[in-house]
Image (cartoon, rainbow, N blue to C red):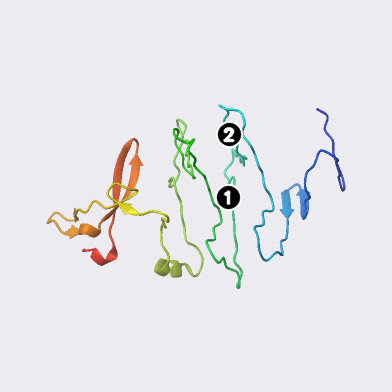
Amino acid sequence: MAQTRFSGPVASDNGFEGEFLGTLAITDDGNTITTTNTATSGTYQPLVVDTTMSGAGADGGRSKFAMSTNVALGSFSNALKAEVTYGASGRTTGLGSAFVTEMSLSAGTSSGTYAPLEIELNVPSGASTGTGTSLIYASVNGAGAATFDTSGAILTLAGLTAGAADAVATPGATFAATATGTALGGANLRGLKVKIGSSVFYLAAIPAATFEA
């Protein structure tokens, strides 16, 4: 297929859909799309990639951001970065996040394995794990990081209720923390269900009010 290059405004009767309101800067250092939204209501999405998979058995359906290197890079390297900055008067009334994954299940998802977030660490033969390698790396940064230490939470699980064998389980048992049998939790003990391989385990979660050293 022949390649066509445009320089300046472009119009097409059938080849383009919608209207782009913003600026696109193409330079040797990378491409930058800049948009501004002044609306005070509604949802603003400056870029939408909408894909419909209509062929049974196909893979994918994703947009791919790939970064490859065969040299020692600097202090960081990423294939995709999501960043939100709240100014001095900025806030979100509800939930604000820098990156969100969302999946909707249906009656058709009766088989297969589903997770809104999939993390894959590929370790080929002979690979090194460097100074420290983990499946999740989380950090709190900035001069006010101590504020998070006081008021923040490592993990928030919303939409769950505790039950005997639920994702947040209530086994109603005690946990011996020391060789002398110091009990922790009792009826208030909670367990977070995790799967390691094909086996189910429960990570103990103990309310501070019932914690004993």
Q: Where residue 80 appears, x then y in whole percent?
A: 59, 47
Looking at the image, residue 78 sits to the left or right of residue 5; the answer is: left
Dot placed on the residue nearer the N-terminal end, 1 or 2: 2
Residue wearing tag 1: 74
Q: Which residue is mark 2?
A: 60
**Which residue occupies 24% across, 51% down?**
171
Q: Quadrant of residue 13?
A: top right
Q: Residues within 10 Å of mark 1 (few under 14, many from 20)?
A: few
Relative to 39, 121 lies left or right? left
The quarter of the picture where residue 188 lies is bottom left
**Above or below: residue 56 compared with residue 132:** above
The amino acid on which the numbered mark 2 sits, given as a three-letter code, is: Gly
The secondary structure type at the circle numbered 2 is loop
Residue type, label 1? Gly
Secondary element under disc 1, as helix, strand or loop, is loop
Residue at x 81% of width, y 38% of height: 15
- Answer left or right for 155 relative to 18: left
Q: Residue at x 27, y 59 (%)?
A: 206
Name the one closer to the observer, 64 or 52. 52
**Vertical relation: 10 (above or below) 197:** below
User: Which is nearer the eye, 194 or 126?
Assistant: 194
Numbered badge on residue 149: none
- Residue 39 % position (x, y): 70, 64
